[in-house]
Image (cartoon, rainbow, N blue to C red):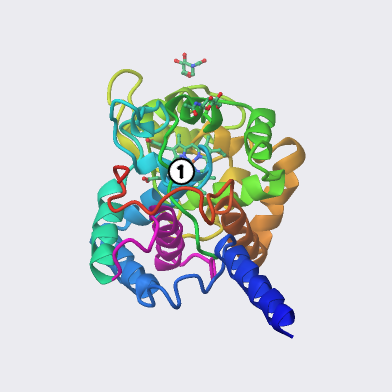
Amino acid sequence: MKVYFKLISILLLLNSIACEAKLSTKFYDGRCRDAAAIIRKSIEKAVSREPRMAASLIRLHFHDCFVQGCDASILLDETSTIQTEKMAIPNANSVRGYDVIEAVKREIEHACPGIVSCADILTLAARDASVAVGGPWGNVRLGRRDSTTANRSQAETDLPSPFVDLNALILAFAIKGLNARDMVALSGSHTIGQAQCFLFRDRIYSNGSDVDTGFATTRRQRCPRNGGDGNLAALDVATPDLLDNKYFKNLVERKGLLQSDQVLFSGSTGGIVSEYTKKPRVFAADFGKAMKKMGEIQILLGKNGIIRRRCSAIN
Ligand code: HEM
Ligand SMILES: *[C@@H]1O[C@H](CO)[C@@H](O)[C@H](O)[C@H]1NC(C)=O
Ligand SMILES: *[C@@H]1O[C@H](CO)[C@@H](O)[C@H](O)[C@H]1NC(C)=O
């Protein structure tokens, strides 16, 4: 009898360790009940102050997850041992929202010190940002832990460039366990937010057959042949602050801003773009699913990683 109980208690113990080591939508329920509400309120406030912040936070999450997984490595500042990803080519002078996340983290630390990871905050912030601009995305699973390292060179190799062709885009996502359909759905994030002139200049001056002439002419007004590199344009001309399926309609009309946007309406992914123009609900469902999948790339669980006290530094 005694042995039997001992066995059961060992099994229960093992089970609780196993539970620790996996993601769950209820992860903070007994640990920091208010975490989700604190994050949601603060993200809603940030987005109402500046609508573009919704886009910036979604991109921040993407650029975190594609470099050694969703471990908040992108938030770490430079030290003698850490090469900050913030200075990597795709991120420098481009990725935004660090201050919003650090401010949310301060609020969370006040409520429940040492419990909620920066990686989970990034995931929830991206989810809440999406919802704040009319996007889909339901419950997310939580329990990610934070890295003690960052990898600038991986940020430069693994984050896709806007100048590459369709096969390279498909490959960049395949390496992270995401298929072409996930890639197209996730690119639907470009239905909000902005891009700098130097990243779409070649396209609008190309006179290419895949660019609408009227669209190119309009875009040239704020993106001259020389200079104005940092001038901004909406990624979605139609509804720049709404997470909807207009982005895909733009692509069919040859009004994609980036080369990497327009190439999606070609080859093996062209049909997916067409489908999303006609079926907004299918896009919404796929977007939500793909976001969750992206948010679970190579996460640190259980005893791996740490809970950072500040997101920009290791404890
Ligand atoms: C398919 C490959 C992708 C490429 C080549 C790409 C490239 C870019 C580029 C060049 C910009 C403009 C940056 C700047 O002007 O400083 C941008 C903006 C943005 N990207 Fe992507 N992206 C891709 C996929 C994604 C994915 C998967 C997401 C999210 C899940 C995403 C979300 C965003 C958002 C929301 C913005 C606007 C950010 C803001 O306004 O602050 N992108 N992207
Ligand atoms: C950074 O990532 C690359 C692969 O992209 C890997 O070869 C390298 O070892 C990593 N560096 C560190 C310090 O983890
Ligand atoms: C595009 O067309 C304009 C005028 O029609 C011309 O000046 C320019 O050189 C062309 N650009 C390219 C890349 O062919």
Q: Quadrant of residue 128?
A: bottom left
> Where residue 175 sits in the image (x, y, percent)?
66, 36
**Amino acid carrying mark 1 in the image:** Asp
Which residue is rendered at x = 50% and y = 70% of the image?
A: 27
Residue 15 showing in the rendered view: yes
Which residue is rendered at x = 67% and y = 61% of the image?
A: 278
SS class of the residue under badge 1? helix
Judge whether residue 18 is colored magenta: no
285 or 41: nearer the eye? 41
In the displayed structure, 270 sits above or below 291; it is above
> Where residue 188 sits in the image (x, y, percent)?
55, 51
Judge whether residue 132 is colored magenta: yes
Looking at this rendering, what residue extends furthest in the bottom direction? 1
In the displayed structure, 264 sits above or below 104; it is above
183 or 8: nearer the eye? 8
In the displayed structure, 248 sits above or below 210; it is below
> Where residue 182 sits in the image (x, y, percent)?
66, 50
The residue tagged 1 is 64
Tell how many labels.
1
For label 1, the crowd category at 10 Å Cα-Cα, with few meaning under 14, some 14 to 19 and many 20 or more, is many
Q: Which residues are magenta?
A: 112-140
